């Protein structure tokens, strides 16, 4: 019979322990690696693009599904107008302008070359018509007219464009004009364009009322009388791709052919940005490839059953409880279908909350986990202001509790 000596037993036990530790660590690393790969941008998707720069983003979460040299600085052409539209809708939201306002076209606006709807100096069109001209026909003259109407001059408007871009994290973008004509220093990236496209379609979904129109007409009213002018959408996907919802094309000598394509299928909104495609046919075909890939792979989890929130007890306030709410709804995108039952959530409320409490203050979080790993959270915030109680009020409250 083979007998293992005690010294050998200890050695074998040590080796076995090391093997177990290594196996455990490797398994943990594999799980983390697997999840990390799930979140990567589709480098191994098998998609091959002729265009030098592209990105595919899911709109509700802002997560990137695929990218190719998405931070390369390139001329954006008329995709620039996405930011122009954002500022127009900002001005409408703020009450600065209205859809029925009449905009008088200046000589400078009427002189714009490139894509245009041939507005004449002194001609008046409503804001609603101008948005249609920009969204459908990529009208440079309408862009400049709107920039002057909102900010007085195009240069002042462009300053607002750059300010808005910085607020969206578009760190590699610099606008020089509001319409996208080739100019030194007027540059952006596929990632930045996706960011501003996401802002437009999520904050102002009414843009789709314009960007999905295939053909329409406007009426030019000038001193020569009224004349009808036809508009055709420059985005051929509106007619060719079943789920297309927009968004904007662009083409110049330096930019080549660009596109920011938005689409919705089964409640999932995607944005595919193509930059510097060699021709128009390529930009549309490659955008469709990206969108189809996204719809076939991504799985969106949206929490439709967030726990009901009770009033939260606080100290030293004029009130003993504060009303609260969730800051936003929670959604998360997985690149590959998952079992939503494996997603768990935990509500955490801050301890020892004391007045003063301001509306919007974070007083807790609802945290989400997939197979034990945290995937995101939503802040629980105060929905009211609670002032700090003065000394006399605090004494009265103490006696009130003692007398109960």
Image (cartoon, rainbow, N blue to C red):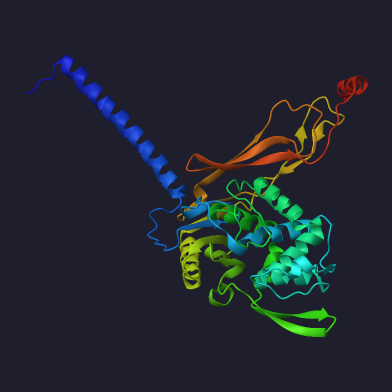
> How many numbered marks does the figure carry?
0
Horizontally, is 277 left or right of 363 in the view? left
State the residue at coordinates (83%, 80%).
Answer: 222
Using the image as rendered, state which of residue 289 and residue 267 is in the foreground. 289
Q: Is residue 204 visible?
A: no
Q: Residue 332: x and y, percent?
A: 56, 50
Horizontally, is 123 left or right of 60 in the view? right
Q: Is residue 60 above or below residue 266?
A: above
The residue most toward the top is 7
Q: Is residue 211 above or below residue 41?
A: below
Q: Residue 403: x and y, percent?
A: 89, 22
Horizontally, is 304 left or right of 108 in the view? left
Using the image as rendered, state which of residue 173 and residue 233 is in the foreground. 173
Q: Is residue 203 visible?
A: yes
Q: Quadrant of residue 30?
A: top left
Q: Is residue 39 above or below residue 251?
A: above
Using the image as rendered, state which of residue 285 and residue 16 is in the foreground. 285
Q: Quadrant of residue 356?
A: top right
Q: Name the image quarter holding the N terminus.
A: top left
Using the image as rendered, state which of residue 279 and residue 296 is in the foreground. 279
Q: Residue 164: x and y, percent?
A: 69, 49
Q: Residue 160: x and y, percent?
A: 73, 51
Q: Name the image quarter holding the C terminus.
A: top right
């Amino acid at each position: 019979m083979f007998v293992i000596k005690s010294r050998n037993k200890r050695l074998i036990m040590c080796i076995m322990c090391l093997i177990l530790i290594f196996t455990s660590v490797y398994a943990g690393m594999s799980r983390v690696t697997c999840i990390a790969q799930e979140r990567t941008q589709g480098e191994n998707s098998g998609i091959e693009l002729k265009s030098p720069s592209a990105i595919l983003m899911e709109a509700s979460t802002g997560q990137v599904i695929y990218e190719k040299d998405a931070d390369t600085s390139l001329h954006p052409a008329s995709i620039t107008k996405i930011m122009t539209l954002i500022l127009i809708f900002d001005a409408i939201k703020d009450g600065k302008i209205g859809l029925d306002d009449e905009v008088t076209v200046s000589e400078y606006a009427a002189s714009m070359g490139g894509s245009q709807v041939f507005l004449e100096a002194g001609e008046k069109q409503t804001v609603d018509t101008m948005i249609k001209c920009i969204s459908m026909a990529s009208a440079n003259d309408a862009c400049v007219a709107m920039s002057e109407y909102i900010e007085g001059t195009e240069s002042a408007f462009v300053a607002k464009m750059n300010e808005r871009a910085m607020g969206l994290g578009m760190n590699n973008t610099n606008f020089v004009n509001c319409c996208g004509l080739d100019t030194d220093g007027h540059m952006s990236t596929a990632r930045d364009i996706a960011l501003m496209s996401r802002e437009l379609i999520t904050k102002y979904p009414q843009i789709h009322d314009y960007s999905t129109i295939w053909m329409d007409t406007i009426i030019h009213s000038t001193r020569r009388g009224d004349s009808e002018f036809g508009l055709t959408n420059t985005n051929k996907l509106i007619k060719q791709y079943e789920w297309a919802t927009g968004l904007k094309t662009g083409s110049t000598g330096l930019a080549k052919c660009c596109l920011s394509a938005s689409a919705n299928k089964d409640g999932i909104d995607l944005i595919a940005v193509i930059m510097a495609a060699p021709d128009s046919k390529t930009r549309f075909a490659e955008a469709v490839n990206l969108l189809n890939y996204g719809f076939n792979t991504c799985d969106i989890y949206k929490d439709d059953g967030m726990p009901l929130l009770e009033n939260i007890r606080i100290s030293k306030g004029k009130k003993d409880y504060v009303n609260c709410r969730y800051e936003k709804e929670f959604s998360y995108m997985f690149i590959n279908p998952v079992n939503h039952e494996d997603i768990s959530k935990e509500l955490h409320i801050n301890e020892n909350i004391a007045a003063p409490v301001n509306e919007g203050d974070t007083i807790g979080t609802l945290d989400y986990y997939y197979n034990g790993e945290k995937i995101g959270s939503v802040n629980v915030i105060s929905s009211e202001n609670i002032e700090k109680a003065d000394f006399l009020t605090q004494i009265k409250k103490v006696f009130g509790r003692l007398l109960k």
